[in-house]
Image (cartoon, grey):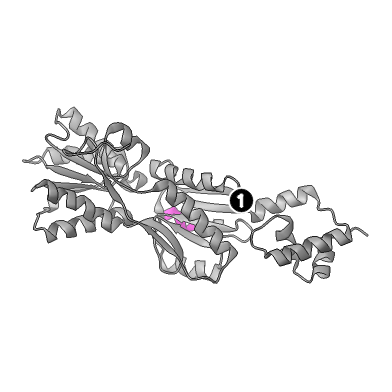
Amino acid sequence: MSVTIYHIAEKAGVSIATVSRVFNESPRVTPETRLAVLTAAEELGYQPHASARSLARRQTETISAIIPMISNYFYAEILKGLQDKMGGSPYDLLVFSAPNLDDVENLLFKALHRGRSAGVLLFSAPLSDSMVSRLQKNGQPVVLVDSFHKAFDSISTDNFIGGKIAADFVISSGSKRPAVLAANPNSVPARDRLIGFRQRLAEADVDLPAESVLYSKQQVFDGFNEESGYDGMKELLAQPELPEVVFATSDIQALGALKALREAHINVPEDVQIIGYDDLSIARYVGLSTLKQPLHEIGAGAYDLLMARIKNRTTPIVHTIYAPRLIERQTTSIFELIV
């Protein structure tokens, strides 16, 4: 009679699932248990079936990432950090792309379906009460990326502080006519950046009129796109006075704004200064002043958080929050060249 994992489990005194994890090199097994299983297998002369082992690895050693708007440069740079960190790991990455936030919930529970993945990374999505309830009942490891909820591990930058830093630049420059190119109002990161910007300006008695805040009318990428920045800048240019400093809630919007200013033959930064948010790779090439998010580090850190949660489900929840910093380049009047 051929030896099976059932025989090994009985001899080692563990479950069948534990034997499967050992043979698939899962990190979710203690060294003592791994040794007991391998010793039992050797004593019984067990040889795992190659195709069955391969199938099991695809089912249990996958990390799922649910990402809205995957073609966005922001997510591409975070994914680069994640994939670089996963290079030597036993896990494969399965990416679910949600065209918009309304599709995130369905994709999340598809990824959580039993046997699909060892853990899930959820990007930039606010959690509804129903999502929180189902995630907690499911019990599968989840890490929020560029988002926050007290019940789950998360990694992000402080968007509220980023908005305040942008406002500090406006105040230090002596500007009395700031403006904002904001993404869609339902975007949590954009909303928090605007709240921080408004609050800090108010503390310094700098006025930010309602007509100086242009919300994106674009639905693509939640308003984080070049068209949004271009259209918003055109609306600002149609107003009686030029803004002195424009804060765009993403680098991509800032690029669109720069195009509109160039077409109108308005000099940057002499006539209008521009600040973006993210510090994407392209920002360095166009000389864009921006609030830097450590995107590569966020991707790598998300993997570390998920691995820690997979290995130990009972440790306290961890929230990693980076502080953004202002990188001044050629789109603001006083800059130091940073590459």
- Residue at position x 55%, y 56% in the image: 111
Q: Dividing the picture into quarters, in which one does residue 73 lie? A: top left
In the rendered view, would you say 254 is above or below 308?
Answer: above
**Residue picked out by circle 1:** 91
Q: Left or right? Give the position of 77 relative to 209.
A: right
Asked if residue 192 can be seen in this view, the reply is no
- Residue at position x 26%, y 36% in the image: 337
Residue 48: percent from the left, percent from the top?
Answer: 81, 53
In the rendered image, the quadrant that contains the N terminus is bottom right
Q: Residues within 10 Å of mark 1 (few under 14, many from 20)?
A: some
Q: Dividing the picture into quarters, in which one does residue 113 lie? A: bottom right
Residue 104 is covered by the magenta coloring: yes
In the rendered image, the quadrant that contains the C terminus is top left
Magenta residues, start to end: 102-107
- Which residue occupies the foreground of this view, 153 or 264? 153
- Which residue occupies the foreground of this view, 63 or 325? 325
